Image (cartoon, rainbow, N blue to C red):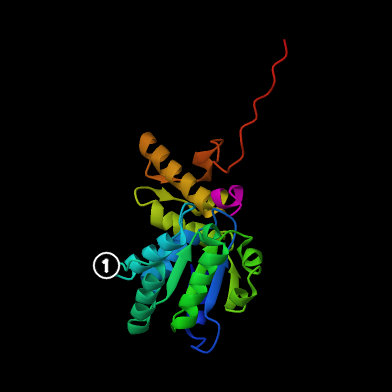
Amino acid sequence: MSLALRTVLECEDAGVDSPRIGLFYGFSGFGKTVAASFVAARTGAAYIAAQSVWSQRTLLEAIAEELGITRFEKTAPKILRQIVDQLNHEPRALIIDETDHLVNKRSVEIIRDIHDSTPIAIMLIGEEALPSKLKEWERFDNRVLIATPAQPASLADALKLRDHYCTRVRVSDDLAELFQKRCKGITRRIVTNLRAAQRAAAEDGVGEIDATWWGNRPVSNGDLPVRRKEFA
């Protein structure tokens, strides 16, 4: 969350004559979307999450709707003008999640047009290859100020996740650390195990759990179970 927030703030502080696009990228499960939601709530940024079926017009309509524009113009260029006018009237950062779905010339040029026509900061969020994908378009790459790799969850992060998600049972530090290590810092999987632990504690009628209580229970870490071949 702090890395994502720092990325947006650095772009906001760059000034209108400087590049103001930041990339926040990394492997699936590192908590990028959660971080984006936190930054949007903290800064008032507009936030959209792209989908694989989006066209350029869909992208424009999603941004316009997030900005509070309720009546769209009939053509894509005019919707773009509505967005630019709104952002110049009420500047706010723009966060686009799942940007990998938009890595094509027309969509990238739309984002560049918004950057060049307004004073706002833009943060694009995507998978680990996003920076290299965007380098295909030099005019766009020149607008990128900073590229921040998302990091796996640390023990401190796991404890914060524990405090947020486990409100009905007390989960010890050592159990949260077990999940953090076994899940290799993947936020989504840590949360999955914390929730599973809370449910298991409720079923057992236990109000406080630790690594000893967890014992040999499996940890959901993405590894597929191996079925041993039985020989006759």
Badge 1 is on which residue? 71
Provide residue 27's location: percent of width, then percent of height: 59, 56
> Which residue corresponds to the image point at 47% horizontal and 46% vertical from the top-left?
192
- Inspect the magenta stretch and tell me whether residue 182 lies in it: yes
| Rendering quarter of residue 198 | top left
**Residue at 48%, 74% in the rendered image:** 122
153 vs 108, nearest the viewer? 108
139 sits to left or right of 2: right
Which residue is more in the foreground, 215 or 43? Answer: 43
Residue 30 vertical position relative to residue 206 in the rendered view, above or below: below
Is 104 rendered above or below residue 195?
A: below
Residue 206 sits in which quadrant? Answer: top left
The correct choice, above or below, for 221 with respect to 123 in the image is: above
Residue located at (41% from left, 60% from top): 58
Image quadrant assignment for residue 94? bottom left
Judge left or right: residue 187 versus residue 228. Answer: left
Which of 109/133 is in front?
109
Residue extending farthest to the front is 75
Image: 88 above or below 75: below
Q: Position of residue 48 (x, y in %)?
A: 41, 63
Query: Horizontal placement of 40 versus 136: left or right?
Result: left
Q: Residue furthest top?
A: 232
Residue 59 located within the stretch drawn in magenta:
no
What residue span does the magenta drawing correspond to?
179-185
Q: Position of residue 222 (x, y in %)?
A: 58, 42
Crowding around mark 1 (Cα neighbors within 10 Å: few <14, some 14 to 19, many 20+) is: few
Q: Among all residues in the image, which is located at the extreme left?
A: 70
Indicate the amino acid at tag 1.
Arg
Q: How many circles with numbers are drawn on the protein?
A: 1
